[in-house]
Each structure stands twice: as C-alpha cells, then as structure tokens.
Amino acid sequence: MRIDGKGLIDRTKPVRFRFDGKDYAGYKGDTLASALLANDVRLVGRSFKYHRPRGALTAGSEEPNAMVEIIGAKNQTPNVRATVQEVFEGLVAQSQNRFGSLKYDLMAVNDYLSPFLSAGFYYKTFMWPRAFWEGLYEPIIRRAAGLGSLSGKHDEGVYEKAFAFCDVLVIGAGPAGLMAALTAGRSGADVILAEESHHLGGRLLSDGGVIGGMAAADWVAQVVAELTALPNVRIMLRTAVTGAYDNGTYGALERVGLHKAARPSLPRECFWRIVAGHAVLASGALERHVAFQDNDRPGIMLASAVRTYLNRYGVSPGKRVTVFANTDAARGVARDLMAAGVTVAAIIDPRPDASSVEDCPVHLGAEVIGTRGRLGLTGITARKGSETFEIETDCLAVSGGWNPTIHLTCHMNGRPRWNEELAAFVPMEGAVPGLVAVGAANGSMSTHGALASGHAAAVRAAEALGRRVSVDLPQAEDAPYVIKALWQVPGKGRAWLDFANDVTTKDVKLSAQEGFRSVEHMKRYTTQGMAPDQGKNSNVAALAVLADATGRGIAETGVTTFRPPYTPVSIAAMGAGGRGAGFAPQRFLTSDQASRDRGAPMIEAGLWYRPSYFPKPGEATWREACDREVNMVREAVGVADVSTLGKIDIQGKDAGRFLDFVYTNTFSTLPVGRVRYGLMLREDGMVLDDGTSARLGDQHYLMTTTTAAAGLVMRHLDFVHQAFCADWQVRFISVTEAWAQFAVAGPKARALVNSFLETPVDLPFMGVAPVRIGGVDARLFRISFSGEEGYEIAVPTRYGEALFRDLVARAETMGGGPYGMEALNVLRIEKGFITHAEIHGRVTAHDIGLEKMVSAKKDCIGKAAAKRPGLWGPEREQLVGLKASDAISAGAHLFVPGAEVHRETDQGYVTSVGWSPTMGAWLGLAFLKDGRARIGEKVRLVDHLRGLDVICEVCNPVVHDPEGEKLRA
C-alpha cells in the first residue's frame, strides 16, 4: 500500500502499466516491484523446480524471485528483475515460468512431488529404459528447462558499445562511493562514478540518518550537486560495473532506454569498456536471509528491502509487519514503519540480550519456525524456548546480517577471507591490481567507516597521480556492527536457501551425505547459486550449512568461484553493432574512391573491399586487364594498395624475446633497420600465418600479417602473452587502420620511390627506414610480393588517398600504373609465394618446404607438436608448382595419369591457379604426396565440378627468377 509523504517518487507524474494482462497505476520513479506492491500485488512469479509462489524478496539487482518478461513492440526480454525495471507509460510485463495462469500454475504439482524430486534426482533418474530418453525424457526436460521465454522474432532494438578512460573509477554511489568521488573530483583527477540504481546515495536513501549535521538525503543532494558541477567528473546512473579484467579494464552495462517507452533512435543498453588508472569499489553489502520452514512465501522479504520500499518508493509491503532479525540495525525498519503509521506486529530477535525499547511487542531469544499462506503470507509461528506462539502478519522482514559485495574483487581468481567478527567474507587486499574496496564492501558497516574509507582510498589514488586534495570528513553514525550468526532455524519442514532454484538446507546436507563435500561439487549437485541471481542472497548461508554438515569451519569450507558478469548482460549489448551489416562490417581502403574512379570492380578480401583489376578502354575481359597489369609490373612499375595487411606494433624490453617465441625463426638478433620473413605455428604445430617483422628500434618491432589472419594473429599473440609469458616486458597493439601502405614494384620502382621522397634513400633488400614525403613522416620498406624490385611505403591513414593518386600518376608517366588483386595473385604464383589459400590450417612447415625455418637453437610455439609422427615425411602432401597448357582450376584434385579417379587414389589438391603471361602457360600451386621428389613428373588434374581433366607438369613452385636476382637488384 502507498504511504503518504514518503518516497522519492514523483507523485505529480502518474504512470499506467500492465502486468499479466491487467492495468495498474504507478508513479515516475517507481520500479515495477514497488508499483505492484503499491497495488497490493505480492505474487509475481514461480520458482524454477517446484513452481512455488514467489514475491519480491529484495529491492535491487540481487533479486532471485521477482523476474518477469518485458514485452515490447520489437522484442521480448525474459528474466528482467522487477526490482530494477522502472515503470514507464505503456510498460507491458508478464510473469514467467508458469503453465496456465500465475495464480493457478498447473506445474505447481511438482511441489507435491518434491519427495521424488530432491537434489540430484536427475542424475539418478531418466537412466532407464534407455529407449525412453529421446522419445520421452528429453522432450519433457527441455520443455521444463529455463525460466523466461523469447518471442522467436529478431530483436530489433538498438544497442550500443562505448569506451571510456579515467584516472579514478568509483563503483557504487553510497556514502563511501560519494565521498571517494568527491575527494578524487576535488583533486582534479578524471573521475567516473558508476551507480547501478537510478539514484545516487545508496542505503542513505533508505536508512536515513545524519551526516555533517544535516539529514542524510540533504547531504547526498549537496554532494551530487557539487559532483555534477565538476567538469572532470562523469556520473553514470543505471550503470552496473559487471566485471574486472586485466590492466585496469572494467566492463559496465548502462541501461540507457529501458526505463522509457521505445523510440527508433533510443538505445536500450550500452556496454562500456572502462579503463581506469585506479578503482574504488564502494558496492556496499547485501543483506542475507535466514533459513526456516516455509521462509519463501510472498510477503517474506529482507528487512532492508522493506525499508527501501518504504523510504524510497513510499510503499509498505504489508499492513501488519513483523521483523525477524539478529542485528540492531534491522530495528530501524520497525521504527520507520511505525513512524509512517504502519502496524508492527512484533519484533523477533534470536539474541536473548538484545535491547527492547521499541513501542511494539519485542520477543528476545525467539525464532520464526513456520509460516502460513500459500499465495501470500498470512501468519507466522514463532518459538521462544519451549513455548510457541502465532502472529497474524502479512509481511515478514527478515535480516540475518550482511555480506560485503566482494564479487568484483574475485574476478581475477582472487579469494576472499572469512571474518569471524562480521560472520562474512571480506576481500583480500590487492586481489585486483589497482582496485581498493571501501565501506561495507570491505566490512566497514557504519556510515562513518564508509565515509572514512572512501575518503582515504581517494586520497591515496590522488597522491599516486601526483595530485593533492584536502576534504573535511563529515561526522556520522559510527555504531559498532554486532551480530550473532544465524544461518538456519532447526525444524522438520523445508527451509529454503536458493529461492530461484528451490534449494533447501536438506539438499545441501544430502550433498554432503552422498560425498559431494567440496563446495564446487555441492554447487553442481544441488544447483545452489546457479540461478540468474548467482546466489547473491544464499551462497554464504549454503556454505555455512555445508560446513556444519561436514564438521568444518566456513573458512575451511571455502567459496565457489566468482566470475563475471556481476549482473546479467544481454548478448545484444556485448555484441552491439554486430547485427545485420554490422556482423561483417564493410571495410574500405583509403584508395577506395580513387580505385572506383578508374572503374575498378571491387571484390571482398576478408572484410575489406579491394580492386580486382583496373580496366582500360578496349579491354573486353578481366583477363586482358590482368595480363596487362602483370606485364606492366614485370617491365615497368606498378602500384597496389596493401593497407589490408595486418600491422601489429610491438614494444618493450622483451619484444625480441617474445617474437622468438611466437615465430619459428629468430628475431632478437635482427639489426635495427632490417626486415625478416617469419613463420608462425599454432600450438598443434600447424602453420598459423607468415609475414614480415621490421625492427624499428632496440625495443620496437612492427609485425606484418596476412590480410586474412590479422585478427587471428592478434588473438594468438594475446593468448601466448597471457598464458605463457605474462611477466615479460612487452606490449603490442594492432595499428592496421592507423597506416595506409602501398606496394611499388617493378624495374622502375626505385626511380618512382625516389621521385616523391624529400631525401632519396638507397635501401638494401629487406631494409626499412624512416622517410618524409611532403612534410609527412612515413616508413619505407624494401620488400616484394611480386618477385621484382619492390618497396612498400606507409603513411598515416589520413594521407593515404592523396599518396595513392600521386603514386599512380607518377607511375603512369613511366609506363606503369595501378594493379589489382587478380594481377597480384598471378605475380605471387609465378614467384611461389603462399597465402592462406595454401596455409589453410592443415599444413606444417615441412609441407610448404620451410622446415629449415624452424630454428634448432630455440623453442617456439608449436615446435614440439610439429615433430609428432605423421606430420612430416614423404607420405605428406607437399607444396609444388604446376604448369599446363590448358586451363586448370583451384580445388581440383591430382591423380597419377592412367589411374582410376576415386578417393583412394587421390594424390593431392590444387590451391591457387592463374594464367601467366610471363611464362605463357597456366601455373598453379598444389599439395602433392611426396611432391618435392616428383618435380618433372606428369600428374592428372581432375575437376568434375568444372568438367576439367588436364595433364600437368609438376615443377618448382618458383618459376620466375628462381635465384631472386630481380628483387635483390
């Protein structure tokens, strides 16, 4: 029911919404849960296994019960927490995980079958008869699995991803977070304050109190006003930091438009990647439940949630509220309710020596042992000593203490430590480099402790940044946190731990009884903590029950592994921009328009669009243009845009050592100013990629990869670095898009290059040098992919188009011009150069004739695996060249002339072909069994798909300038 004069909602702005087909009214600022409670709707869902009635348990993102489906015009989102979803005009929501109506769920029959559906029953049942699995068991299980449902239609909502950088990231905006942000903000540091709620203030907005002589809400408003005015502070509301990653990187999900009616241009969510120099974790603490018989009925809530609904939303979850708590702080719930005119039926405190000053019945040394009310709480049974008594109540506010929200501190394999005084786990210092937990997240449960620790952490961060700051610490409540741990109340009935997955104390004890004593084993046996809430409310209590069942302490029992994300993240947000055309984005060269202006048809090469050929008047076919371009490069000079090649900048003291490890050959001995060809293997010994790396300085290299493997190699380097040499001093980054690069090849290449350099250079083959072109710093490489004297010139991307147009114009004055992919392919086949047509993932260095590049003096990735039997020897298919007078095709298979054509007689396959105007024949590259020993033989090429049956000569892959005199000229 609504309480007049309470809450932060805007009562001047009523909102209409619909739940399960019925219209309701709320106010701007309400969550769906608070608005439903205001309308006396307590039943909002059903549990997973037994389909027991469920109502809201909490008021935040840790909610295990009140999960609903949000129905939009273009999407349907399941498992949305009603405690987080804000109401807006036209919101449509429906309950989930029911068969029939919410009130009359036919699947509730499972609750009566619970003796047969205990923990682990699915491991013991459905084993026989074996034939029943596919026809009966599996369909039933699949039908019952999951909670929410999807519409089956494409989600047409708009999602975004974004990046942010800051000096200090403050996670959470309670008293500790606000104090940290204010202190860091006043120091002049760049600050991001991320808060998952739609209000700043945290528990101060629910619990009230006095800070610095003023009401807590007024202090919050004052701090927020100052932070908003600071230009170096960014406040991010509705933003949950979901994970902590390497090098100060944090993932965060911002709910951009989920609290508003959908509009075409309004993003639903934005996934942020935030890189912070320092981070302050002020995530607070989560209140925990107490396990007792039938503690899961709608109307049974956490005490902190009751207080939040009252003071933030102006709603009382019941007309007669009972408080069951083992801490002094929870008594504030009763005082606030009575001050608002709500009847408090009783306070039940298991501590016999607790205070008894509230103006309501207080039962010390008592416990709740049972409840009544199938679809909503109507009463409870309590016990004091040997005496039991009944209390009529429609809301039970429960508090078993608080668990610091330590999740982010454990995302990099850190483990928390048990604090006996707090009866809770607290984070280990330094578990995440650069992250400091403060306030309740670090066990400081008083307001003063939160303010002091937040201030101290921000001061340390500011000093580390070379900044000074002076902020007065306001006075605030500093009462000690005294608790007597209470995990469960003994009884005969089912006492629930994990409400979402229907895990009881009996299930945990059964796990231990059957030998699943490890906390990780118990988790999987019972599914404890595996629901959408990930056990935020129940894990610690379950650990305590397991510890008791196994005769161990909680510290010895340990915790399960914490993994990102802290709260659910929609796949659409993480993959924002990757839908439709964004799934495979079109990438255009800087020379794209210049190439199109010349009539070049564009073809896809990976995700790039590159010119196939450059037609001239009178050329009727692409072959004519291709042949002309090949002859042009061989006889004069040609220009090609090769910017698509992957470029990875590698720096650090161990950069050369790192390259030695990922390449088969040695790069640490490469002199500065030189380039070396390298071969890279996968862990299984197969060839991953080939390319060149140039040494630009003592600790600076530039790696070049093939176009097709640019992303693959970058991921491979990341994996190798993290898995095998994370302590090496080396850093690398992709700079593919930062540089436009152009190949200049042919007998006149040197003359063309020197015509546009400010100072002509005489580079040796496989050399690199810094140069200047028209006042712009550039890099010049002496490398060739054509077999002719060749250079590659790299300039910052913004100068790419201008340089390409200038290069082509100069080349045309020398009898040359641009050449495209078709000519590039013929040129490299004539020279026997490989691409990913050859190194397609199933070949070794031995197969392509480069086994001598695998250094015997050092180790490298894939070296040991490449020596496995079957990966080398004459029985392997080896790279060879093919020559034929008739047309041949890639994809064709090779056979001995006269042999039958079938799988058993297959001798190899063709990977690349092209007509060579230089040699006056069709040339190809192929893999042939024992191919290097069969040079000069004839083979039969068969391609049934294209109707080809051709006799070819096996030749050396290199047919043009086999001694390399031209490219070294």
Image: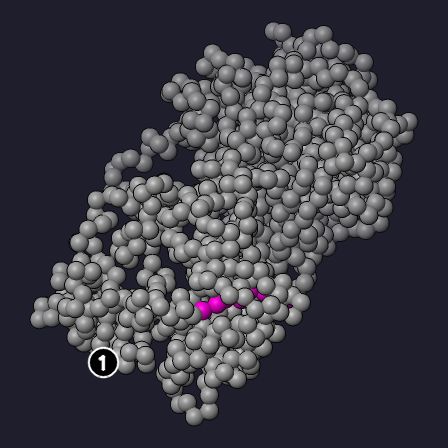
**Nearest the eye: 44 or 545:** 545
Please name the amino acid that badge 1 sits on.
Asp
Q: Quadrant of the C terminus?
A: bottom left
**Stretch in magenta:** 790-799
User: Visible in this render: residue 125?
Assistant: yes
Identify the main secondary structure in magenta.
Answer: strand
Measured as percent of width and height from the top left, residue 9 is found at 80, 43
Residue 867 within the magenta-colored segment of the rendering: no
Residue 791 within the magenta-colored segment of the rendering: yes
**In screen coordinates, is 422 left or right of 698?**
right
Q: Residue at x 59, y 73 (%)?
A: 756
**Which residue is tagged 1?**
886
Q: Residue at x 28, y 81 (%)?
A: 920
Badge 1 marks a residue whose secondary structure is loop
Is 113 rendered above or below residue 156?
A: above
Measured as percent of width and height from the top left, residue 26 is found at 75, 47
Measured as percent of width and height from the top left, residue 501 is found at 50, 34
Q: Among all residues in the image, which is located at the extreme right? A: 213
Measured as percent of width and height from the top left, residue 395 is found at 69, 28
| Image quadrant assignment for residue 137 | top left
Q: Quadrant of the N terminus?
A: top right
Q: Residues within 10 Å of mark 1 (few under 14, many from 20)?
A: some
Q: How is the image coloured?
A: one colour
**Nearest the eye: 638 or 613:** 638
Is 246 rendered above or below residue 667?
A: above
**In screen coordinates, is 246 left or right of 323?**
left
